[in-house]
Amino acid sequence: MWFQINRLKSFFRSNINISMSILMYFILKVILFSFEKSFGRTSNNLKILNRYEDRYLRLKFESLFFRLKIQDAYRIRISHLVHKFKTETENKLLLQNYLAAINDQAFFNWINLPKDLKDFLDNFRFRELNLDFRNEILDENVSVFIGGPKTNFSKVDLKAYDYLVFNKPPPNEIIKAFTGKKILVFCGPTWLTTKQNLVIEILREFNNIEFISQANNSLVNNFTAYSQYPNFPFGACLMNLQRTLIATNNIFVNSKFVVNGYDFSIYKDHHSTWYQKKALLTGSNLLWTLGRHDFMLCLLFTKNFFRDNQGFEGETVSLLNNELSHLMEDFQKTYAYSKVRF
């Protein structure tokens, strides 16, 4: 009963957040138009205008994304980024990180950028993201299974792997059946705080599982590679899969990885039953989370990561080998009834 109530609360809360974001975009649009028309764009008010225009463009991106105008949203995001590159004289690292993460020609073609933005990107010197944190090597020459929210354990040969890696603890019967070296659960601080009693219970019963988190908590360990990931502008950030990939690629050297169960929430039934029982905010409109984290940033970061690191295979790797336009058609179909229509 309480589970269903929490799902309903999450659903309404996320949709209210989406609606408020879109409403604020329209309000700020009117304010900026009125201000500029009344006072013009002078040196005295330029700083004020730039500050509010920056917020306006972030809200415009979210407004378009939440209404499933994805191509329009990312044309605005790239335009915003290029504008900041040309006007800011300091602190361009975050902007460079963003362009490095989304550097994919298929994506640039798909959003159909105008000529001035194409010219900028054609002449831009893309830098590589720093993802090398190999100061805490856990093991080497091992086989690692990385399982996402849709992992189907009936299709996983537990004996084939030295390590299992998840973002939520697997079912107890899986922990008990695993005879490899260790199960690692990479989890966020909010989840750990909320589910601390569950973590205590699991650690008390099993000695082959370990929790990894940035949280300052005696129940968990941490690795530099999990806590020091690239930062980006616009409030965008990497999600569980991306941070887990960075960490595992650093702590396991010369190893083989199989990545299954992550589909970037492109398709329906986002979680397997075992994962849903241990997740937070189930039932919410995922468009809110995907828009705020920056869906395309995470997708393209992962695609580029698999391209640059040859030790990874599995269903998730194969998924990203599909045409981007086909993936986005499926994304549009999945969220056709979740978008806000105004």
Image: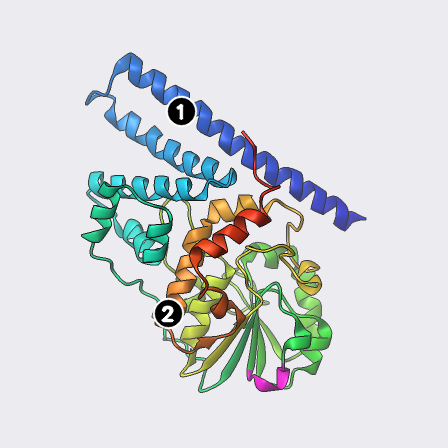
Q: In this rendering, does residue 99 appear at all?
A: yes
**114 is higher (above) or lower (below) than 232:** above
Q: Residues within 10 Å of mark 2 (few under 14, many from 20)?
A: some
Query: Which residue type carries mark 1?
Result: Lys
Give the left or right position of residue 7, taking residue 251 as reference.
right
Task: Tell me which corner region of the image, top left, top right, bottom left or bottom right, holds residue 339.
Answer: top right
- Which range of residues does the magenta coloring cover? 157-162
Give the left or right position of residue 144, taking residue 274 as reference.
left
- Give 31 or 65, whichever is nearer the viewer: 65
| Residue corresponding to mark 2 | 307
| Residue corresponding to mark 1 | 29
Q: Earlier in the sequence, mark 2 or mark 1?
A: 1
Farthest right residue in view: 1
Give the left or right position of residue 134, taking residue 69 as reference.
left
Task: Tell me which corner region of the image, top left, top right, bottom left or bottom right, holds residue 25.
Answer: top left
Q: CA distance from mark 2 to mark 1?
A: 40 Å
